[in-house]
Image (tube, coloured by chain):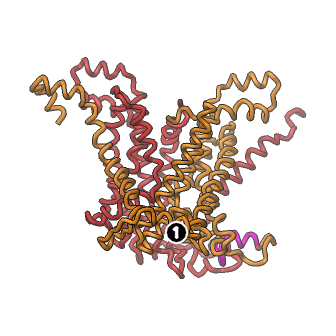
Chain colours: A orange, B red
Amino acid sequence: MKETLQSRGSTAVRTRFFKRYGKYLYLLPAAVWIVGVVGYSVTRVFFFSFFDYNPLRADRTFVGLENYVRILQDPVFQKAMINSAIWTFGCVFFQVVFGLIGAVLLNQRFRGRGGIRGLTLIPWATPSVLAAMMWMWILDGNYGLLNDVLKRTGIIELPIPWFSQTTTALPALMLIDVWQGIPFFAVMLLAALQQVPGDLLEAAKLDGAGPWKIFWSVVFPLITPTLLITTVLRIVWTASYMDLMMVVTQGGPAYATLTIPLSAYYTAYSELAFGEAMAKATVQALLLLLFVLVYLRLFRRRGAVDDVQ
Amino acid sequence: MTSNKRIPWSRIALWTLLAVWLVFALGPYVWMLLTSLKDRAELFTMPVRYLPQKWTLESYKALLGQTDFLRFMRNSLVVAGSTMITTLLLAIPAGFTLSRHEYRGKPVILSLLISSQFFPSILLVLGLYPIMREMGLLQNLLGLVIVYAAFVTPFTIWLIKGFFDGVPREIDEAAKIDGCNEVRMIWHVHLPVIVPGLVAAASYIVIYSWNEFLFAVTFASSVRTNTVPVGLKTFIGDFVMRWDLLTAGGVMAAIPILVFFMIIQRRLISGLTSGAVKS
């Protein structure tokens, strides 16, 4: 369409209009699509979080802040908020630590480095349901590989039902997420490590600094911006990630693995209380937004996260 | 000779750590593969037998013969392919214009693109459900394509903009002197140059759509429309776990994505990291 418009060049006005605004046509379809889906649903969720609302029946009653008051007073939702915090920060903490070690390992020179790099990334490309399933089988209470190994080595006497006792269910799920997420940090930090100029390392070595000292005082400050950005991205993403709970524990046992998004999901689809579920989702979004703003403010002041904008 | 006899502790440490990492990363896959090759009765023995006593493809026969797994694969392929085409059609022009044209609010547009990735997916699930229901897009693969395309387009634009940035501006000038208009220039001049980048973007989209679970289970879980992840989930019953079907299905679901991933991982990663690392 653009071609015919231009080649005919019918009127000067039209051409000028096109020259001026034509570039927006390139952006328009994508913008409409994204705003139409993401913008629409975010607005709608926020709006109906103030309603008693069930899309299966057509009724909706405005209830003001009632949904919010109710969920914030609900001990189960309070538990979900605590679980969400443990889940999110726990998972990301271990991913950062092991991802950093992994990046340093992969940055060494050794035979077959390219292939090994590729292999270590595989968990990251694994579908969540598949990851959940593989670990359910390994951690199975009766016939699981882990219990078998622990019994053979004499560490435990009786098999541990990892996913069905309150103390181990959430940590076991976190193990799966950490398994999936380590490669993400390893890859991002490896890319940052490779950008560290070699002469800087040479200079530090000439000054007589050992490898440990070089890493913490020369290399680490240089990769900090990447570390901060990938961490905030991963935190936001992990907080919303609920596939593993949906497949493995459905929030149980005794709400031990119930997180905020999962709680919103079940409120909507099991109790059909969509208004309340939307209030929960809004709380989740606002908490994340608050977290990101504080995080950026905190680190922007140190001049570390400038490039995220 | 004596000087070379020192034990290379740092090498040993490196390889030990790498070995531990590889066992941790790949162990679950190996165990799934071994399990899928066992006889069903052999799965439930204690203590566990690590290698199959009798190597058999019975689980795969059951998977293909008794379940709709092939249909799940077909659904996943359809969704992944359609999402890929839709997203590329949306993202290529957007990526081009953000790379080449001047805009008043360009930094704002770019940060909006990134921030749209921050919205929790539960918001989209809840917000879209009523309207999708009204429009008949539930239990419909088209609905999934619409949602997936919206979800992956921002990041794809970001990737593709980076690839266009890598094409020298002199090429644009030359094409313009030859009387090429912009759309033809993108098609005939730019796209061939950024094909490797497009492959990386396409594979990101395919991997996302192939793996996605939450939208698929909420919007399209029916025997007719199950994608592979949702289909696999149906083998996890409330009381009976069909580990034979699960492990065989898991192997079959993993093969295409892993082959694909190993082929493109280097390029995908350079694309992914360039956004985060450069400043």
Rendered location of residue A202, percent (x, y): 73, 23
Give the crowd class for mark 1: few <14, some 14-19, many >=20 residues within 10 Å: many
Q: Is residue B115 visible?
A: yes
Rendered location of residue B42, percent (x, y): 61, 79
> Is residue A143 covered in magenta?
yes
Q: Residue at x 38, y 68 (%)?
A: A52
Q: Residue at x 55, y 74 (%)?
A: B243
Q: Amino acid at mark 1?
A: Val
* Vertical arrangement, residue B261 with respect to residue A253, above or below: above
Residue sitting nearer the eye, B156 or B16: B156
Q: Residue at x 55, y 67 (%)?
A: A73
Q: Chain of mark 1?
A: A
Give the residue pinned by disc 1.
A247
User: A2 left or right of A186?
Assistant: left
User: A50 left or right of A210?
Assistant: left
Quadrant into which the N terminus of chain B falls: top right
Region in magenta: A140-150
Q: Residue at x 43, y 65 (%)?
A: B228
* Vertical arrangement, residue B138 with respect to residue A302, above or below: below
